[in-house]
Image: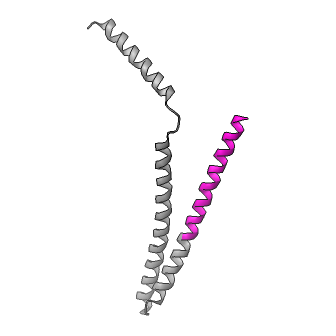
C-alpha cells in the first residue's frame, strides 16, 4: 500500500463516519431511558437519606436522654415526611423542566 492509497482510504472512512453521524438522531431513546433511570435513583436516594437522617437523629437523642425509642420513632417519621417532600419537589422541578423543553420545541416549529 502506498501513502496515497492510505490517504484516500482514510478520507473515504472519514466521509462515511460523517454521513453516519448526520444520519444518527441527536438524542436517542437509549439516552432518554438512562435519564429517566437517573431521575428515579435521585428520588430513591432522597427518600432514603431523609429516613436515615431522621433515624440517626432519633437514635442519638434517645441515647443522649436515655429514653425509650420515642425520639427514634418520631424522627424516623419526620425523616420520611421530609424525604417525601423532597421527592415531590424534585418531581415538580423535573416536570417544569420537561414542560419548558416542550414549549421551546413548539416555539421552534412555528
Which residue is rendered at x = 58% and y = 60% of the image? 91
Vertical comparison of 84 with 25: above or below: below
- Whether the magenta-drawn stretch holds residue 8 is answered as no
Chief SS of the magenta region = helix
Q: Is residue 58 above or below residue 42?
A: below
The location of residue 80, given as percent across then percent down, is: 51, 75
- 63 vs 99, left or right, is left
The residue located at (45%, 25%) in the rendering is 20
x 44%, y 78%: residue:
55
Image side of residue 92 versus residue 18, left or right: right
**Vertical order, 50 against 76 (above or below):** above
Residue at the far left in the pictured view: 1
**Front residue of 6 and 37:** 37
Q: Is residue 85 magenta?
A: yes
Residue 31: x and y in percent read 48, 44
Question: Which image quarter: residue 17?
Answer: top left
Is residue 102 found left or right of 69 in the rendered image?
right
Location of residue 1 in the rendering, given as x and y in whole percent from the top left corner: 26, 8
Task: Provide the residue span drawn in magenta.
Answer: 84-110
Q: Quadrant of the C terminus?
A: top right
Of residues 69 and 102, which is closer to you in this image? 102
> Which residue sits at x=51%, y=76%?
79
Residue 51 lies, in percent from the top left, at 47, 74
Amino acid at each position: 500500500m502506498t501513502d496515497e492509497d492510505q490517504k484516500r482510504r482514510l478520507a473515504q472512512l472519514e466521509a462515511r463516519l460523517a454521513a453516519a453521524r448526520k444520519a444518527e438522531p441527536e438524542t436517542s431513546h437509549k439516552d432518554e431511558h438512562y435519564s429517566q433511570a437517573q431521575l428515579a435513583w435521585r428520588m430513591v436516594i432522597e427518600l432514603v437519606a431523609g429516613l436515615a437522617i431522621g433515624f440517626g437523629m432519633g437514635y442519638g437523642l434517645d441515647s443522649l436522654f436515655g429514653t425509650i425509642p420515642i425520639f427514634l420513632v418520631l424522627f424516623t417519621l419526620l425523616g420520611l415526611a421530609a424525604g417525601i417532600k423532597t421527592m415531590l419537589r424534585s418531581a415538580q422541578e423535573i416536570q417544569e423542566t420537561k414542560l419548558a423543553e416542550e414549549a421551546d420545541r413548539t416555539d421552534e416549529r412555528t
